[in-house]
Amino acid sequence: MLLWIRTIVFTILVPGTIAGYVPYLFMRNRVPDLGTGSLHCLGLLVMAVGIFIYLWTILFFLLHGKGTPAIWFTKGISFIIGEEPMNMVSSGLYRYSRNPMYLGVITTVAGEGIFFRYSSILWYALSLFFIFTFVVIFIEEPHLEEKFGDEYKNYKKRTRRWL
């Protein structure tokens, strides 16, 4: 039960900030600048897909990984957001992408940009992709190779980083 609570706290603090609070800051006191017409409703679908992806990956982290999405260097606050998964997760959406959780967050933010009609949020979604790519390549992948060894190296060979 504690693991679930910590996952909820993590979700509120990290993706909640990235995909909720920051886009709100982009919209605050500004006028929408995208003329998407009725296509802006497509943004709701894109957001829903992103949220679904994120929730699906969370479930696999909890059930198969036996941990939360907390990154290994957050050990100092693990009492709040939990520990990284003990087991490597390579099933579910992780069979198709090594980073579906990041994809879920980026998709959610892109959907917000479309729905609320703010190009700045779409640019923010694109910048998140580059930031997440940097984090994955230079921080997460080396750590996971060290932690899971050949299991992770073989997983990298058969599963693409993004799609």
Image (cartoon, helix red, strand yellow):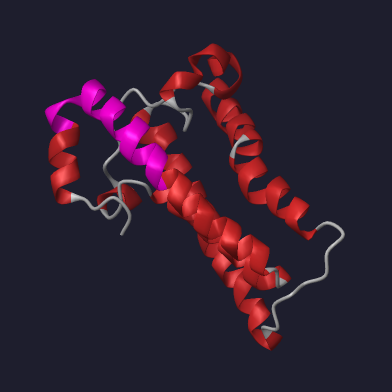
Observer-nearest of 40 and 83: 40
Measuring from the top left, give residue 77's x and y in whole percent: 57, 16
The N terminus sits in image quarter: top right
Name the residue at 83% across, 56% down. 28
Residue 24, position as x, y percentages in the image: 75, 53
For image coordinates 34% across by 52% down, the residue present is 93
**In the rendered image of this protein, does residue 18 appear above or below residue 145?**
below
Above or below for 112 versus 35: above
Question: Which residue appears at 58% of the width and 26% of the height?
Answer: 6
Count of marks, rendered view: 0
- In percent of width and height, residue 29 lies at 87, 59
* Magenta residue check for 138: yes
Can I make out residue 1 in this image?
A: no
The residue sitting at the bottom extreme is: 37
Residue, x 18% and y 41% (percent of image)?
Answer: 155
Magenta region: which residues? 133-151
Q: Nearer the viewer, residue 119 or 106?
A: 119
Q: Is residue 114 above or below residue 156?
A: below
* Horizontal arrangement in the rendering, residue 17 relative to residue 66 (left or right): right
